[in-house]
């Protein structure tokens, strides 16, 4: 938000709304179907309530889903890590399963302060659809999927197709994100966030998932945050580095393509020029970090 | 909406509007003025209270959300007369200047202390990054946390 607007807004109070506290998923989906675009789902509230205080959002109805049983879980099942809609960042932080996804764990450790991690949910971070969402780059490189439910039923959407722009997703008005599914993989991964302080939104961030053969990059997935209208999967960069050696001087040259794939803006946190330049470096660093995590030693 | 919850160890009830924030209910209905309003947008941690034992921001929590839960503020600590280890350490290290951020630090420190484990200085610095202090520069606060938790 712009600092100038903060001074004119009273963050001590919240505008009025009609409040609902469904006790089952079915009840929540019925409400969502009936109330449509004027309703917002409340989970952690760390984004929604701030937007309501600053006037960026003025929902007529609030559907608090926190009393719905069975939406808060972290399970490894059938080759997937399954994260329920009410699972918080702190839940992930304290769960041993998260270590199976080092890039996600990197993001969890760097996200917000303790209180925000205790309150905020992963699902909310995705639905808020900020280009700077810390959970997005790691989940993108793991090929995560999101499960969207409505009164009509359930559909599964690849995260890569989920974001459509700043604050926008493919979710329909009557849909709710009920689960994040992350496939278990054998490769290595890392996430690097560049921010003024770790409490702050990212200037830019990069996640890499990679499988190595010796020091040769085989399968590789690259995603970036805060450098495009939505969290970005950098497919051209993936093609460019596949087959190259870590430590090969041409690796950094190959990553020049990252600068073409991103489309950053200039804002209070950084300039478009800097974001473009640093994107390449962050991807390089995340790739090297993945390599080192895989047990590799640079020549 | 009528809500009932456990506040500092005793069961209380209150009539609240859905858009009422926990911080305002605690301060105005229950007179618990240790809970401080800082930024109102989740940056400063001055309004931190424990809900079911975990540190949350009462300025971003609806009062209706604590219905049936357990809320602890600084007023609920040290009820047997003695200060908690975190409170004592903050005092001994002179970790307080204007004092406005202190209740938030006390609640985070209490949460960490109750976990019953030790923390390194690096961990402490990371775990208090959601609490802003504009006076002390954090040096004495970190010292105090190390004393109580290290």
Image (cartoon, coloured by chain):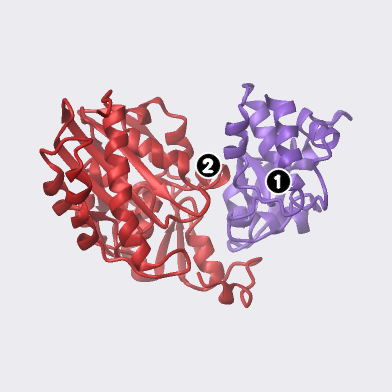
Distance between mark 2 and mark 1 Cα atoms: 15 Å
Question: Would you name the residue on which mark 2 appears?
Answer: A118
Q: Determine whether A239 is above or below B150 in the image.
A: below
2 or 1: mark nearer the eye: 1
Q: Residue visible at 71% across and 51% down?
A: B133
Q: Determine whether A132 is above or below A293 in the image.
A: below
Q: Which chain is depicted purple? A: B
Position of residue B42 measured from the top left corner of the image (x, y, whole percent): 58, 55
Q: Which mark is residue B17?
A: none
In the depicted view, which residue is nearer to us: A295 or A139?
A295
The quadrant of the picture occupied by the C terminus of chain A is: top left
Badge 1, how many Cα within 10 Å: few under 14, some, many 20+? many
Position of residue A32 measured from the top left corner of the image (x, y, whole percent): 35, 61
Q: Residue visible at 39% across and 35% down?
A: A105
The quadrant where residue A229 appears = bottom left
Position of residue A237 measured from the top left corner of the image (x, y, whole percent): 17, 51
Question: Would you name the residue on which mark 1 appears?
Answer: B104
Question: Mark 2, chain letter?
Answer: A
Going by the image, does B129 lie left or right of A147? Answer: right
Question: Mark 1, chain letter?
Answer: B
Q: Are marks 2 and 1 in contact (CB under 8 Å)?
A: no
What kind of element bears circle 1? helix
Badge 2, how many Cα within 10 Å: few under 14, some, many 20+? many
In the depicted view, which residue is nearer to us: A168 or B52?
A168
Going by the image, does A42 lie left or right of A138? Answer: right
């Amino acid at each position: 938000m712009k600092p100038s607007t903060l001074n004119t807004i009273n963050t001590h109070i919240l505008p009025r709304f009609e409040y609902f506290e469904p006790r089952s998923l079915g009840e929540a989906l019925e409400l969502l179907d009936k109330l449509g675009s004027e309703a917002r789902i409340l989970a952690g509230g760390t984004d929604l309530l701030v937007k309501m205080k600053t006037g960026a959002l003025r929902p007529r109805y609030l559907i608090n889903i926190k009393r719905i049983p069975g939406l808060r879980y972290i399970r490894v099942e059938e080759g997937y890590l399954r994260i329920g809609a009410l699972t918080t960042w702190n839940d992930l932080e304290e769960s041993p399963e998260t270590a199976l996804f080092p890039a996600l764990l990197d993001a969890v450790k760097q996200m917000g302060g303790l209180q925000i991690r205790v309150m905020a949910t992963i699902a909310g971070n995705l639905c808020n659809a900020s280009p700077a969402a810390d959970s997005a780059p790691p989940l993108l490189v793991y090929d995560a999927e999101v499960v969207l439910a409505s009164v009509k039923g359930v559909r599964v959407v690849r995260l890569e197709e989920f974001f459509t722009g700043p604050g926008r997703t493919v979710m329909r008005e009557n849909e709710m994100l009920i689960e994040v599914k992350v496939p278990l993989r054998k490769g290595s991964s890392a996430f690097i966030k560049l921010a003024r302080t770790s409490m702050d939104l990212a200037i830019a961030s990069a996640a890499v998932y990679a499988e190595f053969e010796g020091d040769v990059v085989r399968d590789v997935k690259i995603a970036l945050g805060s450098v495009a209208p939505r969290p970005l999967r950098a497919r051209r960069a993936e093609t460019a580095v596949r087959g190259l050696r870590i430590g090969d001087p041409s690796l950094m040259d190959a990553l020049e393509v990252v600068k073409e794939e991103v489309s950053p803006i200039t804002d209070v946190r950084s300039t478009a020029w800097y974001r473009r330049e640093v994107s390449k470096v962050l991807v390089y660093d995340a790739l090297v970090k993945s390599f080192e995590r895989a047990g590799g030693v640079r020549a | 909406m009528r809500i009932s919850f456990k506040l500092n160890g005793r069961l209380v009830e209150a009539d609240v509007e859905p858009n009422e924030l926990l911080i305002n209910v605690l301060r105005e209905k229950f007179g618990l003025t240790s809970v401080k309003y800082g930024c109102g947008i989740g940056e400063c941690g001055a309004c931190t209270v424990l809900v079911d034992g975990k540190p949350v921001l009462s300025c971003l929590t609806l009062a209706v959300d604590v219905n049936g839960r357990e809320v602890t503020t600084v007023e609920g600590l040290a009820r047997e007369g003695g200060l908690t280890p975190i409170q004592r350490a903050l005092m001994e290290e002179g970790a307080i200047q204007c004092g406005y951020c202190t209740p938030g630090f006390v609640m985070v420190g209490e949460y960490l202390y109750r976990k019953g484990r030790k923390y390194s200085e690096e961990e402490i610095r990371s775990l208090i990054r959601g609490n802003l202090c504009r006076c002390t520069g954090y040096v004495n606060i970190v010292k105090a946390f190390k004393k109580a938790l290290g």
